[in-house]
Structures are given as structure tokens and as C-alpha cells.
Amino acid sequence: MNAAGRVVVVGSANVDLVVDVPRHPGGGETVLGGDLRRSPGGKGANQAAGAARAGGADTSFLGAVGRDDSAALLLASLRRSGVRTDLVWRLDVPTGTALITVSPDGENAIVVAPGANSHLAVERPQAERIAAADVVVAQLEVPVDVVLAAARERRPGVPLVLNAAPSRALPDALWDAVDVLVVNEHEAADLAGDAAAAADGDPEALAAVLLRRVPAAVVTLGGAGSLVARRGRPPVRVPAHRVEVVDTTGAGDVFCGVLAAALARGEDLVTAARFAAAAGALAVTRRGAQDAVPAASEVVALAAAGPG
Ligand code: RIB
């Protein structure tokens, strides 16, 4: 690997309250599940842990938590992963909480109570850290205005990697700021809007629609790998690694974090997506979000071995 780059992740931190269920409940239904697990999560914090631990990047997390036990759990987890947490806001509101059910096939359903995440702000110290980054990463569990503020503080040429999750419409200013959009097929279809119908579920066609607004997009396709699409170049399919899926929670976040870490150390987008695919594959074999982040050595070994 080349020298570690500097990644700054602007985003959410949640404590995850997780229950294994035989199937996800429908409206008005009660389902009996297994024992409750409480573990560190939040898309932003998971991405930061992924960039630092699995991607080997010098990583700062810019987020907001409360002054409760959940905040202590999250900060300890991030520090264990090697993430800089010195600029995380501590606020007199509850830390974000995610209620998660996981079905036997490893698929999850999530509801988030944002708590402190809704109060995140970019002030001078955070702006200075962003200005020193090689790659800035954001998602949509914090206010869009905060993502825009972070985007404005980048040095010229520093890419913004936006994981457009959870799905929501993007303002024009954010479309214009994004360098690499990372989305799953559902998010891609939502962002493609009316043009999604003509794409008829074809990832290449969906990506082509997204490239009207952003220079590059990575569409994750679950067990079918991912698609790297760049303006003016043919799309590239990155195959998935065949692994036994235990829990998919946070695997997409680990994918984003490792993608950003690889870009920060100077890899091209396709190579970065190959490292990200290896990290995501390892993450789904373990329970939890941040608890499932693999070590960089494991990621390098699996990426070198190939999808098999
Ligand atoms: O992407 C998984 C994450 O989404 C969970 O850790 C949960 O906190 C929600 O933010």
C-alpha cells in the first residue's frame, strides 16, 4: 500500500439496538425475536471505523453525540478503530439511536432516532480539519446543510464521496459538490427519478442517468458486486466475494470507508472499489456494524486473493 491518506468523515453516530428476528414484522404485527444487542453504529461512524481500521487511513470523525452511556460506547469504539474523535460535539441531547431487526438471511430493517446527529455543525475547528483532508466523506443521516458546509471547506480538487443513504432528494448545490456518489440500487433508482423507469432496473442504465449529475458513481449490487461508472469511460463491474452472510448491517458503510481510504492514498476508483468489496465481504460474515469492521491486513489479503 502507498502512504496513508487523510480521510475526514462528516456524519452520524448511533448506538444500535439489534434483535435477530425470524422475519421482519409487517404493519401492526408483533414478532418475537432473540436477545437484544447494543453495539456501536451510525453510518458516519461506521464509515470512519472502516476508513481507519479496514482502510488504514488517518481518519477524523466529525459528528455529534450526547453525554450519555451511548456516547461513551461510540467514542470508545471509534478510538479502538484508530479514528480521531477530538472534534466530535458533546451535546445535552440524547445520542442517536437505531432500532434494527436482522432476519436469518442477514438482511436488516432500520429505524433511526437521530438525536444529537440533528444538531451537528461545522465550525472553525471542523472546517480546518476538513481543509487538511485528502478525501471528505458524508452521508444523509445528518442535515443536508451540514454536508454542504463540509463540502465548501474542502481544498480545491479534494473529492467529496457522498453515500446518499438514507435515500432522499438532493438539492442542486449538493449534486454539484459530489465527486463520487455511492448508492445501492434502490437509492440509485430514487435519485434517477422519472428516468429510473426507462432504466428498467439495469444498473448500467441507472448509472448513466446519475452521470448526468455527478462525474462518478459506484452502484453497489449486494451479492452481484458493484458497478463503477465514470463520465467518458466504459462502466466496470467489480465482482463480489463469495462469503457466508451473517449480518449485512453496516457493510455498505465499511465499503464506503475503505473506498475513501484507498482514494486518499492515491488509488484509482476501480482499484478502490476492489478493496472496498473485500472489506464489505468480510464485514457481512460478522455481527454488528463497527464490531464487524475487518483489519486492513485481512482486506489486503482478500483483495489480493480475488473474488474466487
Ligand atoms: O448502515 C447501518 C447503520 O445505519 C447502522 O449502524 C445504524 O446506526 C444506521 O445508521
Image (spheres, grey):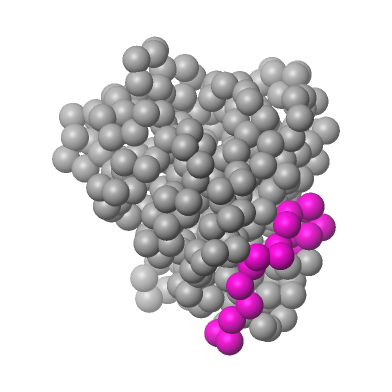
Q: In this view, does 302 lie to the left or right of 15?
A: right
Picture quadrant where residue 17 is located: bottom right
Looking at the image, how many numbered discs can be counted on the residues?
Answer: 0
Asked if residue 28 is positioned above or below residue 52 in the image, the reply reads below
Q: Is residue 46 visible?
A: no
Q: What is the quadrant of the N terminus in the image?
A: top right
Instruction: Point out residue 84 in the picture as x, y percentages from the top left corner.
Output: 73, 57
**Nearest the eye: 296 or 21:** 296
Which residue lies at the image location 74% right of the left edge and 71% below the top edge? Answer: 73
Picture quadrant where residue 148 is located: bottom left
**Nearest the eye: 65 or 17:** 65
List the single residue furthest toward the bottom: 92
Which residue lies at the image location 58% right of the left edge and 87% below the top edge? Answer: 92
Q: Is residue 15 visible?
A: yes
Q: What is the quadrant of the C terminus in the image?
A: top right
Q: In this view, does 65 lie to the left or right of 158?
A: right
| Magenta: main secondary structure | loop
Asked if residue 267 is positioned above or below residue 10 in the image, the reply reads above
**Nearest the eye: 69 or 119:** 119
Which residue lies at the image location 57% right of the left edge and 61% below the top edge? Answer: 126
Q: Is residue 198 left or right of residue 36?
A: left
Instruction: Point out residue 216 in the picture as x, y percentages from the top left corner.
Output: 41, 29
Q: Does the magenta stretch include residue 42?
A: no
Q: Is residue 91 magenta?
A: yes
Q: Is residue 171 left or right of residue 72?
A: left
Query: Which stretch appears magenta?
Result: 77-93
Instruction: Point out residue 198 in the picture as x, y percentages from the top left corner.
Output: 18, 29
